[in-house]
Amino acid sequence: MGIRWQHLAAWAVFIIFMLALPEFVSKGTLRTIIFANFLAIFAISWDVLSGRTGYISFGHPFLIGIGAYTSAILSYRFGFPIALSIPLAVVAAMIGGTLFFLPALRIRGSYFALVTLAFMELMYQLVQVIRPDITGGTRGISGVETITRGAVNNFYLSFCLMALVAFSMWLLMKSRLGTALSAIGMNEESVRGSGLDTTKLKLAAFMIAAFVAGLGGAFYVHYLGSIAPRALFDINFLFTIIVAALIGGASTIIGPMIGAFFLTFLLEYLRPVLPGAERYFIYGGIALILYMYQPKGIYEVAKQGWGRIQAARAGAGS
Amino acid sequence: MSQIIIQGLLLSGLYALIAVGFTLIFSIGRVLNLAYGAYLMIGGYVYYHVTQVLDMPQLVGILLAVVFGCGVGVLKYTLLVKPLKGDHVAVEISTLILAVVIQAGIVLVFNDSSKILHPIVPGVWRVGGATVTFNILTAALASWAILIGLYLFVRNTHIGRAMQAVSMDTKGAAISGVDPDRINLITWGISGGLGAIAGVFFASYTQLNPSMWVAPLIIAVAVVIVGGIGSIIGTLIVAHIIGFMEIISTTLIAAELRGVFTMLLIIGVLVMRPRGLFGREEL
């Protein structure tokens, strides 16, 4: 699990390539990439929790929504500056993450997934009912202050955020903590048997996931400038996040990024052919076939393909 | 008061019907079929198309809905669940993806707008200040009849007992000469058919639209979790708890809160008593 210079070089090449991108592509493509960046952040957050530890979260929009709503409400209703509302939103998301963590003490597997789904639906309904004068009720809030304007600025902002999140998560997952979390996903009992405190480890995973989700959610709402409950606490949104993480390759960092870009561009290229919600028919179909073919995702397919090429070359050489 | 009791009883009957197909799959294969709501949607839309677009008799509509539901259930088992070999997480995720695909497919075929289903049995009945539509009354009666039928089927027929055996212990059942694969296939088919017929009634109670599968899925999940793994009686009891809770919160507190208590119940029960209130390891 060591960090080698090739890894760092790959990161550097990737970051330089992306930073140079606005020189070459259109504004429309940049806007698509902005969405892909945010989706990648959410997918990484999901993957840190679910891809590693095996505690499948069907309620990730709950965490993202807490971050987004807190920041939107603080800045729009109470006039907080964004520099203050985003950190507070992250804190709120982490408190939400603690709530999320409670059921994980006792249940796992399918039951845990269902509880998180219940959390998401609960939040969806509460947001509309409790103090609609603050949350904006069913219609949500629009006119939230944005951080910057223009596709290029927003692209740099979202990309820097995504790269920062991805790189720090990569470092963290290379550490002993990441190894321990993956071990929990394989066999929680034996991790506990080796004398590690699984409760603390799980709590750490939840806190990290909530931190990233809250951060992503808060920046996302200040990019969009509006927020509505059905756009956020929605099974389709959840589906996009999970599919991005899984299609790319769960329990890697690069996987969710690949998945997010692949899916966002797929959806974008389908737009001229199928304008409405029908796009999800093809999008979901491709996701389903890919998932059935290789549950470990595109990253694994590419790795195996590369391995085969290497083997063929070695075979030809000898 | 009589309004609450009557409405509660009728709604609970419908909820029991919605949940029972989901329970069946969960108890046999221990997998959560998150595309279960899609059966209801398929059932509802098939019925709509047959009776209101093609103008065929209602009975044909219901029959075709059941046939479609069964077919989708069987297909889902052979194409999706069986290849994944009981990997629970993989089944849950792939059925979630499938649900979204089916939703989009419905949009593709029937477009986005909501459709109102004519009541299956028109007319209203007034009892002591309460108004009861014949439609929901039929739904409740039908659901009772179906539930009793299912209970007898599971208890008394050979296939039903084989289903019980698989639900208790798959390997043991296989050793005793039951083919778990075949039983699973049959169960998925039955579950699909039940879902489809529940969908016809559910759609006539609310309306048809491409995202209508989420609410019944949540209801089914709530009933199964709170009732515990696969007990038909538990399903029935919890369907009544949830049905009455919804009616009481809608009429006495606020209509918007109808789902909140259901969610709190799911979370509460799962955290306090992960096996559910009536959790037993049998059907």
Image: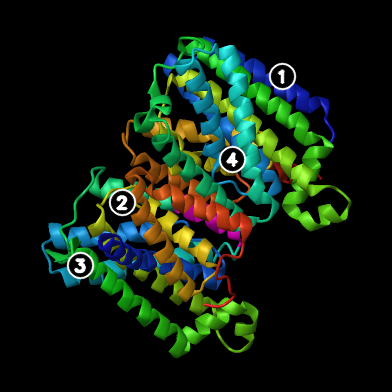
Q: Name the residue that disc number 2 marks.
A: B251
- Mark 1 or 3: the one toward you: 3
- Mark 3 or 2: the one toward you: 2
* Discs 4, 1 touching: Cβ within 8 Å: no
Residue A250 visible, this orientation: no
Q: Which residues are the magenta region? A: B87-98
Q: Name the residue that disc number 1 marks.
A: A12
The amino acid type, in three-letter code, at marker 3 is Gly
Q: Which mark is residue A245?
A: 4
Say whether disc 4 or disc 1 marks the residue closer to the N-terminus: 1
Q: Name the residue that disc number 3 marks.
A: B61
Mark 3, chain letter?
Answer: B
Q: Residue at x 47, y 71 (%)?
A: B24
Closest to the observer, B280 or A41 = B280
Say whether residue B198 is left or right of residue A96.
left
Say whether residue B113 is left or right of residue A281.
left
Closest to the observer, A264 or A308 = A264
Mark 1, chain letter?
Answer: A
Estimate the x, y position of residue A43 in percent, counting from the top left: 58, 36
The amino acid type, in three-letter code, at marker 1 is Ala
Structural distance between the alpha carbons of marks 3 and 2: 34 Å
Mark 2 crowd level (few <14, some 14–19, many ≥20, 10 Å Cα): few
Work out whether disc 1 and disc 3 sit on a shared chain.
no
Mark 4, chain letter?
Answer: A
- Tell me the SS state at disc 2: helix
Structural distance between the alpha carbons of marks 4 and 3: 41 Å
Say whether residue A302 is left or right of residue A236.
right
